[in-house]
Image (cartoon, rainbow, N blue to C red):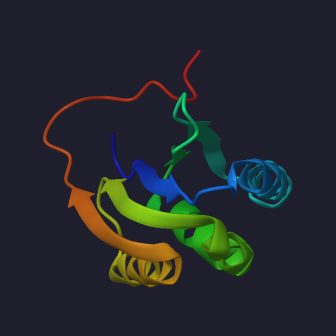
Amino acid sequence: MGDFIAYLDTSEVLPGRLEELKTAMAKLAEFVEENEPRIISYSVHFAEDGSEMSVLHFHKDVESLKFHMDVAGAKFPPIAPLIRMKSIEIFGHPSEEVLAQSKAKAKLLGSATVIVRELHAGFARFGRD
């Protein structure tokens, strides 16, 4: 799998903020699609009852994740009043800089724990025919 990185953050949606958050996240997803050509996938998911949001993205390598944090990072502060981030999970091997960026994001958006899950075994078929 090489340098492949998967990133998942999970947040509590603050009461009364769901519709505003959905609008903000649709705009953020559009921004990421337009400005981050190396990202493989970026998706926003809500619990059925709207109480929780998860954002999942996949990167070919750690440089793509760093670029995401650099480019989209300015878009995170306006989301802070809408959520309380609970966790960030990074699947793969992030650089120290990406880990520091993730910890700063966790602090900005709530009291999230940052967890790194190192690859033990497996494969990816992204980009294969």
The C terminus lies in quadrant: top right
Q: How many marks?
A: 0
* 120 and 9: which is toward the camera: 9
* Residue 99 to residue 88: above or below: below
* Residue 62 to residue 45: above or below: below
- Tell me what residue is drawn at x 42 percent, y 47 percent: 6
* Residue 93 to residue 122: above or below: below
The reply to whether residue 123 is visible in this rendering is: yes
Whether residue 126 sits left or right of residue 28 in the image: it is left
Residue farthest toward the left in the current orientation of the protein: 120
- Tell me what residue is drawn at x 35 percent, y 74 percent: 95
* Residue 120 to residue 48: above or below: below
Q: Position of residue 117 (x, y in %)?
A: 21, 53
Q: Position of residue 5 (x, y in %)?
A: 41, 51
Q: Position of residue 104 (x, y in %)?
A: 45, 84
- Tell me what residue is drawn at x 35 percent, y 67 percent: 94
